[in-house]
Amino acid sequence: MANILVVDDELGIRDLLSEILNDEGHNVELAENASQARNARQRDEFDLVLLDIWMPDTDGVSLLKEWAAGGLLSMPVIMMSGHATIDTAVEATRIGAFSFLEKPITLQKLLKAVEQGLARNQLRKTAAPVVNVPEPRIEAQATPVTLLAEVQTQAQQLFDLDKPLREARDGFEKAYFEFHLLQENGSMTRVAEKTGLERTHLYRKLRQLGVDLSRSKKNAI
């Protein structure tokens, strides 16, 4: 039995996750915001945390930074969001998040992610039973190859193949262009060449998909 903290501002999601995890034999503590999550983490050690990104008081990524800076990120943290971008995935992974779950969360994906997270936690405890060593993770000085590989991994976790074809395709295209913007440091010229699109068409496509162009315009050649 594992000790799991679920942090989400939506009552329905908290109750659903709690019911599922309790049925699996785990002990579940619930928090509806970052303040309650901070208090829970100060009181107890957890084997796993399911953490929502978008919350009213403090977002999940900011809370993750707090825990990492305070030496409290000793457990795998699975981020949850219905609107996560590749940039958000990369940032959270660099801080120390274990993985992502996209809402709505299917039972199969939830149980698989929890199983993998608990296995990682058990491996950490076995490898270092005395000294509490934080999980190795991508830092700011990580090589471009390592960072891009992490982006690709997170992109796969963000796709929901249960969606209708058009929505799934839009999600893939958005992640595809965000990946290439990151790879080419925001250069629209190089992204256009890489993707085989004329620049005007590329700009129109990015706006249609809702890709943030502010960084691209700042760094464009």
Image (spheres, rainbow, N blue to C red):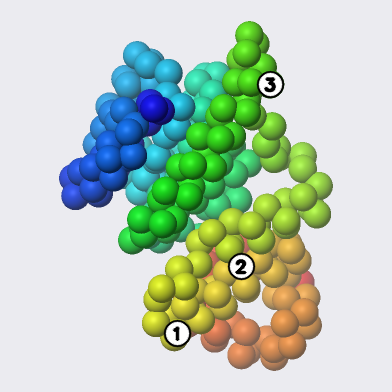
Q: Are marks 3 and 1 in contact (CB under 8 Å)?
A: no
Type of residue at label 2?
A: Glu
Badge 3: how crowded within 10 Å, few (<14), some, or many (20+)? few
Q: Is residue 205 visible?
A: yes
Q: Is residue 126 left or right of residue 104?
A: right
Q: Is residue 70 left or right of residue 144?
A: left
- For marks 3 and 2, the one nearer the N-term is 3
Query: Residue 96: which disc?
Result: none
Type of residue at label 1?
A: Leu
Name the image quarter holding the N terminus: top left
Return the residue at label 2: 178
Residue at image position (80%, 54%) is 145
Badge 3 element: helix
Residue at image position (45%, 84%) is 165
Is 68 located above or below residue 8 in the figure? above
Return the residue at label 1: 165
- For marks 3 and 1, the one nearer the N-term is 3
- For marks 2 and 1, the one nearer the N-term is 1
Q: Nearer the viewer, mark 3 or mark 1?
A: 3
Is 62 located above or below residue 100 in the figure? above
Badge 2: how crowded within 10 Å, few (<14), some, or many (20+)? many
In the depicted view, which residue is nearer to us: 210 or 167?
Answer: 167
